[in-house]
Amino acid sequence: MIPHRYPMLLIDRMLDLRLAESAIGLKNVSINEPFFQGHFPSQPVMPGVLIVESMAQTAGVLVVATLGAAAEGKLVYFMSIDGVRFRRPVTPGDRMEIHVRKLQARQNVWKFEGKAIVDDKVAAEATFAAMIRDV
């Protein structure tokens, strides 16, 4: 549903999808992820920017699913990221659920609230906006 591919595809599957409302994506974090080679070799931690990217990808699936055929030939681009908070590290072996909720949608701009959750605890949260544009 989104154009991302390895190594930039940061969601493994969708657990829940409520059109025009919310979505839950899943990322099974593995030691084999390429970023762990350098972040950090002695104590691997998933980079925060990639956690936020996983929120954006989950939101992208929500947008594409909601728009249906109208989304063909379009991409979803970040516009802004606000209020990002990292609460705990995400490490190899974690099962990260990515919860996104649409806050508003006006024409081609959508705003979301996202949370990355590991073991029922918030690992990261952010509010972000995206624009749907022609390729």
Image (cartoon, rainbow, N blue to C red):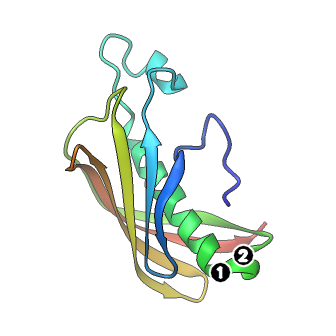
Q: Residue at x 38, y 12 (%)?
A: 41
**Residue 17 x, y percent position in the rendering:** 49, 70
Quarter where residue 103 is shown: bottom left
Circle 2 Cα neighbour tier, 10 Å, few/some/many (<14 / 14–19 / ≥20): some
- Vertical position of residue 28 compared to residue 24: above or below: above
Q: Residue at x 50, y 65 (%)?
A: 59
Report whether 29 appears left or right of 68: left
Residue at the top extreme?
A: 42
- Vertical position of residue 131 compared to residue 5: above or below: below
Q: Which mark is residue 7?
A: none
Mark 1, secondary structure of its residue: helix
Q: CA distance from mark 1 to mark 2?
A: 5 Å
Q: Amino acid at mark 1?
A: Leu
**Residue 2 x, y percent position in the rendering:** 66, 58
> Which quadrant does the C terminus fall into?
bottom right
Whether pointer 1 and pointer 2 mark residues with C-beta atoms closer than 8 Å, the reply is yes
Mark 2, secondary structure of its residue: helix
Residue that carries the numbered disc 1 in the rendered image:
67
Whether residue 78 appears in this view of the structure is no
Residue that carries the numbered disc 2 in the rendered image:
71
Residue at the bottom extreme?
A: 106
**Residue 122 x, y percent position in the rendering:** 22, 51
Q: Residue at x 30, y 16 (%)?
A: 43
Out of 80 and 85, give the one closest to the viewer. Answer: 85
Report whether 65 appears left or right of 103: right
Q: Residue at x 44, y 49 (%)?
A: 26
Whether residue 93 appears in this view of the structure is yes
- Vertical position of residue 87 compared to residue 3: above or below: above
**Residue 101 x, y percent position in the rendering:** 38, 72
Report whether 13 appears left or right of 90: right
Quarter where residue 82 is shown: bottom left
